Image: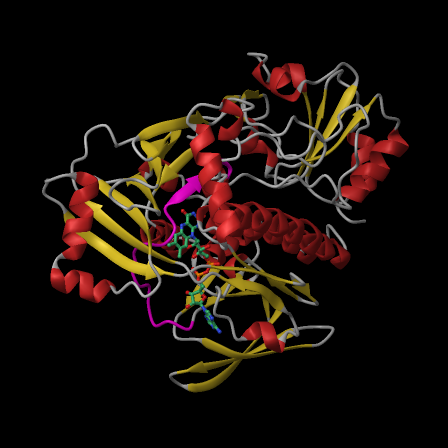
């Protein structure tokens, strides 16, 4: 029997497999396709903390190869309404966002998987049935050799939106499908001045009454995303030359080459359960989001990380199986937030009904002159990590209350539940300068501000890899102390996925033990 089987070799399944292998867990990845297909026009826009997860998974090339952009501009007709850039609460060496095609991301993940002896990939394994009992999950797979049963202690289904296994698991997948259509063309062209910015146009003269989104990508490629009328016919536009005319209205009379084009409709759906016994649902299999805000794959990767460390801790005997309940608690709450954000964007982008259309028009008109109205213009709130402030693993700190969803481009103030900011540190054990995020993923990390000896209490309470460091010995520059807002006498407990589990002021050993156990579901 395998320790973990990941069903679905898309980017979420690939990431989950790599992160499990990082914890020393053997993984089999099954996919119904016969081989990797380089499909275009899917995800491009990947967020800093997701790039950080991929770097931890051994694939720093995604950040390195991606095209960095820092500014999002929003226009109404021929006028720029506003622009924003992203604020880093710490000082990460990673860019806030890069654009890179999903097919290249998958290729880079494949290369790392090929070099990882703990991962076995089986293409042409179509999982047609899933059964489980208290000991194992059995997957019935249609293969070239007939039906094959594969057994595992735990399964991650990362099977994408079209998943036949959800029904068998008894999971509901409710939500809505949007009728509106979007034409997405990736073109290669030289567009001076457009290389480093995301541009969103409401009602431009070259797509009147609708909007257009333009993203720069590596290799002089640009993604142009037009909202198009119902009944839009791509084949007909290609045949008549209307697609060429449409493109030239945006880029002018320049040479260009179409790399990929497709027409999409989007859905907003969420499963009611992300854990069903020994099965964890991740990525598009668990939630489908409209892509404005780039929250699909970005949040799927964070599902993969959450699932991987928890499964690894359970399999290694460091945490009880009930820790897996917190996978649902945390990632379902994250998906609800993502749905809320992306659905609000869709309501603004494609208002339905005369009143909604009129209101949007009024907001856009007002935003030309009124800065307050600009905050109501919704061209997408870009992906951000979720704050596990209500998680059963988090211990709140009354002196650091969660301030709610922060302003666009900002991170919440650091408090329990929030992803710890990154900063350069000196690692005394490795005698090297590194960054905080490179040491958080090795287990439970305790950072003390007054050199309290918390190791005995922590080691008595939990039987998992843990490390205690004194803040002043790792923080030569003071950047980390400033980012944390750390105070004298505190102990910071950080989870293996970098989220702050607790900040304790002058804790006694019993409190450290209780909070340490809580963060592992003990
Ligand atoms: C136009 C567009 C733009 C987007 N832009 C962004 C963006 O900028 N940023 C972002 O973060 N996200 C974006 N997304 C979303 C992103 O593409 C998805 O979130 C991502 O593909 C989800 O990855 P996944 O691994 O969960 O699923 P998938 O990529 O769908 O992979 C699922 C895999 O499971 C396999 N599979 C399915 N069923 C079975 C079975 N029964 N047995 C075996 N194998 C099976 C499939 O063959 C496939 O390989 C965009 C999406 C679209 C459509």
Q: Nearer the viewer, residue 257 or 18?
A: 257
Given residues 71 and 16, the one toward you in this image is: 71
Q: Is residue 34 magenta?
A: yes
Q: How is the image coloured?
A: secondary structure
Residue 251 sits above or below residue 8 on the image:
above
Q: How many marks?
A: 0
x 67%, y 73%: residue:
136
Q: Residue furthest bottom?
A: 146
Q: Position of residue 194 (x, y in %)?
A: 25, 32
Residue 301 appears in the picture as rendered: no
Q: Is residue 441 above or below residue 181?
A: above
Residue 27 visible within the image:
yes
Which of the image's four quarters has the N terminus? bottom right
Q: With 171 as the anchor, is 371 left or right in this view?
A: left
- At 36% from the left and 54% from the top, the residue drawn is 42
Secondary structure mostly seen in the magenta stretch: loop
Say whether residue 75 is magenta: no
State which image quarter holds ligand 1: bottom left
Tell me the magenta residue range.
Answer: 32-49
Where, by quadrant of the figure, is residue 197 drawn?
A: top left
- Say which residue appears at 26% left-offset and 52% top-offset: 185
Q: Is residue 358 above or below residue 242?
A: above
Could you say where residue 39 lies in the image, as x and y percent from the top left?
Answer: 30, 60
* Outermost residue to the top: 477
Q: Position of residue 132 (x, y in %)?
A: 67, 76
Image spot of residue 16 (x, y percent): 52, 54
Q: Nearer the viewer, residue 364 or 382?
A: 364
Is 287 situated left or right of 126 in this image? right
């Amino acid at each position: 029997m395998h320790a973990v089987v990941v069903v679905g070799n898309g980017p979420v399944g690939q990431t989950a497999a790599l992160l499990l292998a990082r914890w020393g867990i053997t993984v089999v990845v099954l996919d119904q396709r016969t081989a990797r297909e380089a499909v275009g026009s899917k995800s491009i826009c990947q967020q800093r903390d997701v790039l950080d997860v991929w770097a931890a998974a051994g694939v720093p090339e995604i950040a390195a190869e991606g095209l960095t952009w820092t500014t999002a501009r929003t226009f109404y007709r021929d006028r720029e309404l506003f622009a924003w850039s992203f604020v880093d609460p710490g000082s990460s060496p990673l860019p806030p966002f890069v654009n890179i095609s999903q097919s290249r991301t998958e290729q880079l993940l494949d290369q790392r998987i090929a070099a990882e002896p703990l991962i076995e990939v089986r293409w042409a394994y179509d999982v047609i049935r899933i059964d489980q009992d208290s000991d194992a999950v059995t997957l019935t797979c249609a293969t070239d050799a007939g039906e094959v049963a594969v057994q595992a202690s735990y399964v991650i289904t990362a099977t994408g939106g079209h998943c036949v296994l959800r029904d068998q698991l008894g999971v509901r997948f409710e939500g809505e499908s949007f009728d509106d259509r979007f034409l997405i063309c990736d073109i290669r062209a030289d567009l001076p001045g457009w290389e480093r910015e995301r541009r969103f146009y409401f009602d431009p003269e070259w797509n009147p009454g609708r909007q257009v989104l333009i993203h720069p990508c590596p290799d002089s490629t640009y993604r142009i995303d037009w909202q198009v009328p119902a009944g839009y016919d791509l084949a007909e536009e290609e045949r008549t030359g209307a697609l060429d005319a449409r493109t030239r209205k945006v880029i002018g009379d320049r040479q260009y080459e179409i790399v990929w084009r497709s027409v999409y409709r989007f859905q907003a759906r969420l499963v009611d359960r992300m854990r069903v016994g020994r099965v964890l649902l991740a990525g598009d299999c668990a939630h489908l989001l409209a892509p404005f805000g780039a929250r699909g794959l970005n949040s799927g990767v964070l599902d993969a990380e959450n699932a991987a460390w928890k499964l690894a801790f359970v399999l290694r005997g460091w945490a009880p199986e009930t820790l897996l309940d917190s996978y649902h608690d945390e990632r379902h709450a994250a998906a609800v937030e993502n749905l809320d954000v992306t659905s609000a964007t869709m309501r603004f982008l494609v208002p339905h009904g005369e009143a909604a259309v009129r209101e949007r028009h009024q907001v856009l008109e007002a935003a030309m002159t009124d800065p307050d109205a600009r905050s109501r213009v919704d061209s997408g709130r870009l992906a951000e990590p979720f704050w596990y402030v209500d998680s059963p693993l988090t211990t709140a700190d009354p002196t650091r209350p969660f301030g709610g969803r922060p302003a666009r481009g900002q991170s919440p103030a650091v408090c329990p539940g929030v992803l710890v900011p990154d900063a350069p540190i000196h690692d005394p054990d490795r005698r090297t300068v590194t960054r905080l995020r490179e040491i958080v993923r090795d287990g439970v990390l305790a950072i003390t501000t007054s050199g309290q000896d918390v190791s005995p209490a922590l080691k008595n309470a939990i039987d998992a890899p843990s490390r205690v460091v004194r803040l002043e010995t790792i923080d030569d520059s003071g950047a980390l102390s400033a980012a944390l807002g750390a105070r004298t006498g505190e102990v910071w407990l950080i989870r293996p996925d970098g989220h702050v589990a607790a900040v304790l002021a002058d804790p006694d050993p019993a409190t450290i033990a209780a909070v340490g156990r809580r963060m592992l579901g003990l």
